[in-house]
Amino acid sequence: MNGVKFNKTSIVYRLSVSEIIEDAISLPVKISGKPAKVNVLLFSKRIKLKFKVFKETYKNLKSEDFRVEVVYNPKLNTWTPKLVKHPVDVFDFSIKPVKISFLIKQ
């Protein structure tokens, strides 16, 4: 096994570590399942996404790598934004606001 050395009295193991960066971006909120003829106003139209990522992959991140959606449901008073697309190296997410108000214009 590469990086592992066995000895009768001790074990040496080498593990590479990486710095973690915390950042936040502003993303537009998309609406899934909305009928084509229905107009919806969102309050707010953008959310703030906080996340953590390893330093080595941070420089490759783009806002297009992320997608936040709410599911169209006129029976609810507010909708909850969900992160539906993100790079695999990104973790520990936080979305604000946690609820989005809306107005349906028909």
Image (cartoon, grey):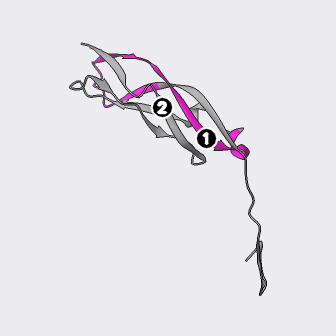
Kind of element beneath mark 1: strand
Q: Quadrant of the N terminus?
A: bottom right
Q: Position of residue 60 (x, y in %)?
A: 69, 39
Q: Residue furthest bottom?
A: 8
Q: Residue furthest top?
A: 105
Q: Position of residue 83 (x, y in %)?
A: 46, 37
Image-quadrant location for residue 38: top left
Mark 1 and mark 2: Cα distance apart in space: 13 Å
Crowd rating for badge 2 (residues with CA inside 10 Å; few <14, some 14–19, many 20+): some
Please say if 94 is above or below 101: below
Residue at x-position 48% and y-position 31%: 95
Q: Which residue is mark 2?
A: 95
Residue at x-position 77% and y-position 87%: 8
Disc 2 marks which amino acid?
Ile
Please say if 35 is above or below 60: above
Report the magenta stretch's main SS: strand
Image-quadrant location for residue 90: top right
Kind of element beneath mark 2: strand
Please say if 16 is above or below 21: below
Image-quadrant location for residue 63: top right
Disc 1 marks which amino acid?
Lys
Q: Is residue 99 left or right of residue 46?
A: left
Residue 52's disc is 1
Q: Position of residue 37 (x, y in %)?
A: 27, 18
Q: Position of residue 24 (x, y in %)?
A: 60, 30
Residue at x-position 56% and y-position 33%: 50
Residue 100's disc is none
- The stretch in magenta equals 29-58
Return the disc, 1 or 2, that comes first in the chain's sequence: 1
Q: Do the residues bearing badges 1 and 2 touch, measured as CB atoms within 8 Å?
A: no
Q: Quadrant of the C terminus?
A: top left
